[in-house]
């Protein structure tokens, strides 16, 4: 039996190869500036339009999008160095690192035992007078916004920043994730729902002030050529990646719909008492970057899937709090739920590289476990 791959980038990109070549040739022939060129600007407008947000700025990657966004908030006086920014313990390391890189203080909060999505009750436990922001990660493609959270943040004057690296196209009450916070960050890492052929990222914001400050920071702190009013870095979405992303963005809704259909099948048909499925929030449309289940004996299940030629992966096997460089600095008693969950969560294959027959087969194998 053929192996069912967790991810197959070759297959995903194969259908675009001719278009990639055509538009790349057109770009090369037309001449251009290559950096901060027309392809980048075109993609930024296209993404802003898709998200229904005022402004988008392309960056070198998702980590930089977050870091530059935070730095812009310091530059504009919304935050100052060492302010506390809350972030969930169950996320990819980039979320945490971006806060530190910007000169702010990340404060980890735990998961509620029942869900992989941040809850207001857990957030409240770590809020202090120094708390100035929440980096909300829409992990696995699950929208993580809800009215209770918005109300709580507003009444406590806590800024909302959204990490949408895994959730492009997810919605809450019809509004896209990434349009609720002061700014949001996206990643176009190749395996993402909208993946480049290399690194790429973007910042979204309705504030022109924030976007223009981010633009300067991402371009050596320069608002005007050779004039460096603020301290900056070099992190600009590459024009060639922007060409690829513009082509793929047209198909993103199709990609996300395929994932939702597959997730719906898993949700309705996985019936095994040893397994629980991670659930989304009400009034949300999720983009299912990953399809995550929970089981007590994960190693055994992974081996069983593997023996049936099905790949599975863990997101993430080590929580932020258990990473070597930070593990001695945190109070692990306050992060028990996320640390326990990280030993039980498992991601099943999902995405347009798979057909429904394969999803049905994975479901049957899981049910026979
Ligand atoms: C939740 C989350 N945040 C941030 C990032 C950082 O994105 P990048 O790898 O493009 O720097 C990633 C991606 O890998 C991610 O999954």
Image (tube, rainbow, N blue to C red):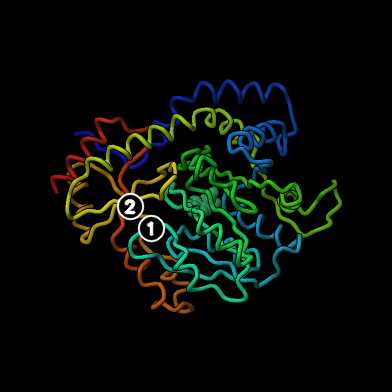
How packed is label 2: few (under 14 Cα within 10 Å), some, or many (20 or more)?
some
Question: Element under label 1?
Answer: loop
Residue drawn at (65%, 64%) of the image: 102
Q: Residue furthest left?
A: 368
Q: In terms of depth relative to the viewer, which is nearer, 248 or 157?
A: 157
Residue beneath disc 2: 278
Q: In terms of depth relative to the viewer, which is nearer, 355 or 158?
A: 158
Q: Quadrant of residue 361?
A: top left
Asked whether the beta carbons under mark 1 and mark 2 sit within 8 Å of each other, the answer is yes
Residue beneath disc 1: 116
Q: In terms of depth relative to the viewer, which is nearer, 203 or 307?
A: 203
Q: Position of residue 236 (x, y in %)?
A: 67, 45
Residue 271 got which mark? none
Residue drawn at (44%, 79%) of the image: 331
Q: Position of residue 226 (x, y in %)?
A: 85, 49
Give the Cα distance between marks 1 and 2: 7 Å
Residue drawn at (34%, 46%) of the image: 291
Residue drawn at (40%, 65%) of the image: 111
**Is 18 left, or right, of 218 in this rendering?**
left
Q: Position of residue 304 (x, y in %)?
A: 17, 50
């Amino acid at each position: 039996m053929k192996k069912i791959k967790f991810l197959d980038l070759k297959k995903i990109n194969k259908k675009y190869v001719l278009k990639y070549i055509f538009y790349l040739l057109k770009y090369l022939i037309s001449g251009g500036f290559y950096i901060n060129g027309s392809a980048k600007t075109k993609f930024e407008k296209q993404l802003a339009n898709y998200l229904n947000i005022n402004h988008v700025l392309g960056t070198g990657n998702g980590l930089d999008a977050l870091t530059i966004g935070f730095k812009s908030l310091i530059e504009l006086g919304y935050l100052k160095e060492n302010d506390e920014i809350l972030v969930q313990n169950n996320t990819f390391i980039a979320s945490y690192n971006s806060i530190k890189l910007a000169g702010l203080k990340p404060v980890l909060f735990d998961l509620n035992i029942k869900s992989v999505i941040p809850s207001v009750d857990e957030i409240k436990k770590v809020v202090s007078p120094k708390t100035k922001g929440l980096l909300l990660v829409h992990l696995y493609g699950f929208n993580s916004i809800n009215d209770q959270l918005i109300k709580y943040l507003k009444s406590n004057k806590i800024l909302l920043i959204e990490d949408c690296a895994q959730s492009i196209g997810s919605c809450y009450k019809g509004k896209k994730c990434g349009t609720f916070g002061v700014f949001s960050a996206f990643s176009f890492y190749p395996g993402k729902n909208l993946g480049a052929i290399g690194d790429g990222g973007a910042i979204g914001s309705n504030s022109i002030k924030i976007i223009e400050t981010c633009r300067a920071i991402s371009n050596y702190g320069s608002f005007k050529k050779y004039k460096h009013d603020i301290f900056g870095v070099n992190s600009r979405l590459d024009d060639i990646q922007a060409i690829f992303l513009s082509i793929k963005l047209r198909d993103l809704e199709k990609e996300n719909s395929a994932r939702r259909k597959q997730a719906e099948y898993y949700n309705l048909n996985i019936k095994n008492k040893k397994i629980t499925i991670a659930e989304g929030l009400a009034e949300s449309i999720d983009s299912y970057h990953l399809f995550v289940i929970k089981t007590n004996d994960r190693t055994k299940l992974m081996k069983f899937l593997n023996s049936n030629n099905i790949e599975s992966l863990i997101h993430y096997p080590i929580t932020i709090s258990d990473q070597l460089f930070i593990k001695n600095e945190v109070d692990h008693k306050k992060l028990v739920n996320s640390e326990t969950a990280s030993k039980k969560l498992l991601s099943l294959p999902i995405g347009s590289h798979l057909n429904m027959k394969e999803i049905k087969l994975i479901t049957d194998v899981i049910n026979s476990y």
